[in-house]
Image: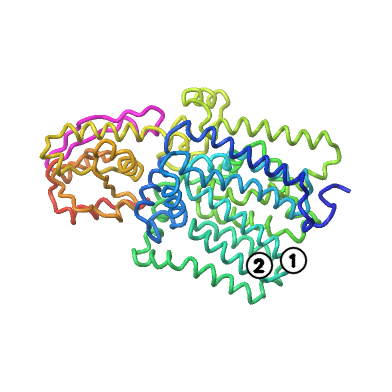
Amino acid sequence: MAESRAGDPSRPLERTALAVLLCLAAGKLLIHLLTNGNYGYFRDELYYIACSDRLAWGYVDHPPLSIGILAATRALLGNSIFAIRLPVVLTGALCVILTGLLARRLGGGRYAQGLAALAYLTTAISLTMSSFFSMNAFDLLFWLACTHIVVRLVESGNPRWWLLLGVVAGLGLLNKYSVAFGVFGLLVGMALTPSRRLLLSGRLPAGGALAALIFLPHLAWEVANGLPTAEFIRNATAHKIVAMSPAAFFGAQVIENNPFTTPLWLAGLGYLLFAPAMRKFRPLGVMYVVVLVIFLLQRAKPYYLSPAYPALLAGGAVAAEQLGRRWLRVAVVIWLVIGGVIIGAMAIPVLPPATYIRVARALGIAAPQEERSHTAEMPQVLADRFGWENLTATIARVYNALPPEQRAQAAIVTGNYGEAAAVDFFGPRHGLPPALSGHNNYWLWGPRGITGEVVIAVGIPRADLEKYFAAVVQADTIVSPYALPFETNLPVFVCHHLQMPIAAAWPLLKRYM
């Protein structure tokens, strides 16, 4: 009998299996600790830092939990690139362990647990999301935690697990709304399997109430601020996110999860949906199908589906453990290691930028384009780590060249939150004032008393500026190799005499997207 069928998954965790999982998690930690300083701060990291200076129960484009984590991290460890990325590095290592343990809960032995953990470690999404701070790394963790809880629920039949699911789902919603789709998919999966009897438990609405209670402060913030996130989602869907065909969406899944893992997760999906041994755990396979359909209908970004893959990798690892020949098992491991090395070089800041571009061209590798403006030779998650210090230094040259009387009243206004957040983060060393922008939460933070008599504008077309100012003069150009195309060869304008009150001009700058 195959190792995966031996024993009860509630048996004590074997020391060898635990050692393998810990070694793989330590390997993931080491990968990121050695590479995370190779490029600069990522656009969204700078924006999150700006948000963490203004703690609230919500933000235009994300809930508050990840910002609270970042604020605590900065208070304890400072603002270095290694410090602010430590929470996502640790979270990624924990997800490696949890993926291996999920295989164990599905009946897998040592090989299955190690294989599932290795497969997750080598996915592009796992490597990428631990290489910069964002809410997405925590989203992976919350989906995995919810999956574990549902597995324990259907395994034990104990309705008390609904309460824990409510707490974890509520915290997950405070991090990113998409965890609701994962929980919904799991509930649909339970409804379509014998586990449906557990849906009749009174603990289910109690768990839902706990989730709602945890989420309530953020919901109250949304209502108080005019539901900005709903407006942000509408605009992003209509004007920002690239619409993909189902075939293109599936192709993006293959790339973002590492083509070398595709046979494993496809096998896992089939195993969870159709294998008699997985009848109890079929909700995991159904969850993937349900969420896939929802995201296709929503025209969501492909990476939104990535938290559903650990369950498929765990199922595939349990199926692979039943391969009769030892050499086949070894070959699967070698295959994943080779794929991990290749995809790792493309997913995290390992190679110098010029070398990266040459290698990507030679291999014919291109990351899926998920946003309409993000077209470059490097994928957005890497290209968006370049140019921010140079942008700030160029603005500082223009600012410091102004006559003292103009410099005293000058404001810096940018076209997007990345530019504004870069000025806020790097600007103090140059003596710059805080930046303003109409993009997302920067608009909500308001104009903060500027007069509009002198404005240094970046990332805003000259034609737009000339509608509002009496004089617009280009003072410099920001040139940042390897940055996204719209962040290089970027004019810096000095604008004089706003032709309307700032209270009338500010609403015109609003851009939730």
Element class at badge 1: helix
Q: Which mark is residue 161?
A: 2
Judge whether 498 appears above or below 171 on screen: above
Q: 124 or 130, which is in the foreground?
A: 130
Q: Is residue 200 left or right of residue 217?
A: right
Q: Are marks 2 and 1 in contact (CB under 8 Å)?
A: yes
Left or right of 123 in this view: 480: left
Q: Residue furthest right?
A: 1
Q: Nearer the viewer, residue 92 or 219?
A: 92
**Mark 2 and mark 1: Cα distance apart in space:** 9 Å
Q: Is residue 207 left or right of residue 159?
A: left
Is disc 2 placed on a helix, strand or loop?
Answer: helix
Within 10 angstroms of label 1, few (less than 14), some, or many (20 or more) residues?
Answer: few
Closest to the observer: 140 or 71? 71
Provide residue 432's location: percent of width, then percent of height.
24, 40
Quarter of the view holding residue 232 = bottom left
Give amino acid for label 2: Trp
* Amino acid on which disc 1 is placed: Ser
318 is within the stretch colored magenta: no
Q: Over which residues does the magenta segment extend?
A: 470-495
Residue at 49% across / 56% down in the picture?
A: 175
Residue at the disc numbered 1: 156
Task: Pinpoint residue 435: horizontal percent, then vertical percent.
Answer: 27, 45
Q: Is residue 362 left or right of residue 261?
A: left
Give the residue at x 62% y 31%. 341
